[in-house]
Amino acid sequence: MNPELEQAFHSVHANLQHLPDEYCKWRKEATDGRMISKSLSADYRPRFHFIRDVTLRNNLAELRMSLDYHLSIFYFLKPGLTFGWQHKLVIYQIIGAIVEGLLTDYLEHLVESDQNELVKKIAKQRTESKTFGLGSLVEIYKQANFFRRPNNIQTLENLRDLRNSVHPRSLNRRTNVRENPLMGKSVDEVVRIFDTLIDFMESKYEN
């Protein structure tokens, strides 16, 4: 290994707070032009203010903050080959957890607002099921034609497959993780897609 490069890695080790601003997704520009750290209470929690379940709202905020930390390390190290796709997978699994939370809360919102007692009872039983996860949610929204465009559902199904890869028995199902279409996209593009989903879901609560 290049001695100078090795020394640089030792210098960075345990000093990530000193990363250049271009790599730090957890920073933002202040009104005076300075770069400052984002705050969980002032930046991340307000992003999910529309989520009705308070505990879930806080959890989603923390996941989104965690995602920014992972993104910062990913952009800084620019991992390739096995390191690259493994870290991508972790990033997309965090996104999957956020999406699961968004879809769950909105479904529960619909359950409470629907006056049909039978619909409410069935939906409540499904949302409280231990086996009810992102896959079940995507299927429900798909059947309801909630996202309308087939590409949107396909993207969610691809995310579901990556999310499910955390389960050992799911690793060999469907498509190999590295062949998943989302793995072929840039991390920037995928994050933009699902940040847009947050805005879309927020608008649904206002209707």
Image (spheres, rainbow, N blue to C red):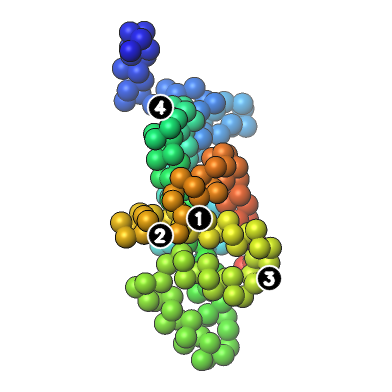
Tell me the CA gap for discs 1 and 3.
Answer: 27 Å
Between 171 and 192, the residue placed more toward the observer is 171
- Is 54 positioned to the left or the right of 138 in the image? left
Viewer can see residue 103: yes
Q: Say whether marks 4 and 2 touch (CB < 8 Å).
A: no
Q: Which residue is mark 2?
A: 173
Q: Secondary structure at mark 2?
A: loop
Could you tell which of marks 4 and 1 lies nearer the N-terminus?
A: 4
Disc with the residue nearer the chain's start (4 vs 3): 4
Badge 2: residue crowd in 10 Å (few <14, some 14–19, many ≥20): few
Q: Quadrant of the C terminus?
A: bottom right
Which residue is at 47% across, 37% downward?
Answer: 71
Q: Secondary structure at mark 3?
A: loop
Q: Closer to us: mark 1 or mark 3? A: 1
Question: Considering only order in the chain, which callout, 2 or 4, is on the residue closer to the N terminus?
Answer: 4
Residue type at mark 1: give it.
Leu
Residue 29 figure quarter: top right
CA distance separating discs 4 and 2: 39 Å
Mark in the foreground, 4 or 2 = 2
Q: CA distance from mark 4 to mark 1?
A: 31 Å
Whether residue 91 is visible to the viewer of this picture, yes or no, is no
Can you say whether 170 is above or below 195 in the image? below
Q: Give residue 191's position: percent from left, percent from top.
A: 56, 45
In the rendered image, which residue does mark 1 sit on? 159
Amino acid beneath label 4? Gln
- Mark 4 highlights which residue? 17
Pointer 3 or 2: first along the chain: 2
Residue under the image location 46 percent in, 64 percent down: 134
Q: Is residue 43 left or right of residue 89?
A: right
- Residue labelled with disc 3: 207
Q: Nearer the viewer, residue 58 or 66?
A: 66
